[in-house]
Amino acid sequence: LRSVISEVLEASVKIFVFIFVFTWLSLDFFSYAFLKSNTMRYIPALISGLLAILPVIPSFIAILPATLQLLYEGSVFASLSLLTLHVYAWLTIPGSMYGAIKNHTGVPPFVTGL
């Protein structure tokens, strides 16, 4: 049981780090006017990473202000691209990282981590 719990926690840390870096880099790449400073790019990335660990609220919620700002500026393609990338990451990344856990007990990994 200890090994399963440690693997779940390790997978949660991996998910947090990946989603945090992915969000920060995507916001840096699209660099819209709403978040000009680096500090304001870290906050949505941090929120997105934390939401990726907790499966209650989707992690792409944190980038909705960015997509709305891009849409307001007239960059419809960039807005849809940013949203599509984050929805795809939200759908695939946690499942693949939790799927790598050995000794799976049949209980969802999030419940095991609790």
Image (cartoon, rainbow, N blue to C red):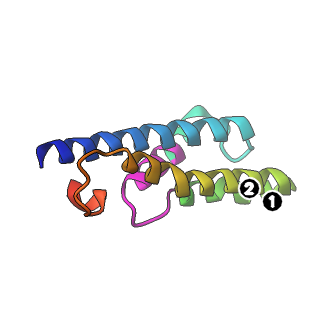
Give above or below for 109 relative to 5.
Answer: below
Disc 1/disc 2 C-alpha distance (Å): 5 Å
Residue 80 percent location from the top left of the image: 76, 57
Are the residues at dot 1 and dot 2 in contact (C-beta closer than 8 Å)? yes
Q: Locate residue 68 relative to residue 6 in the image: left or right.
A: right
At 37% across and 44% down in the image, what residue appears? Answer: 100
Say what amino acid the circle numbered 2 marks: Gln
Question: What residue sits right under mark 2 in the picture?
Answer: 69
Q: Locate residue 34 relative to residue 112 in the image: left or right.
A: right
Question: What residue sits right under mark 1 in the picture?
Answer: 72
Q: Which mark is residue 20?
A: none
Secondary structure of the residue carrying numbered label 2: helix
Residue 101 magenta: no
Instruction: For label 2, count other residues whose C-alpha is less than 10 Å away and answer few (under 14), some (14-19) or many (20+).
Output: some
Q: Which residues are magenta?
A: 44-59
Residue 82 percent location from the top left of the image: 70, 50
Along the viewing direction, whichever of 10 and 61 lies nearer the viewer = 10
**Image quadrant where residue 36 sits:** top right
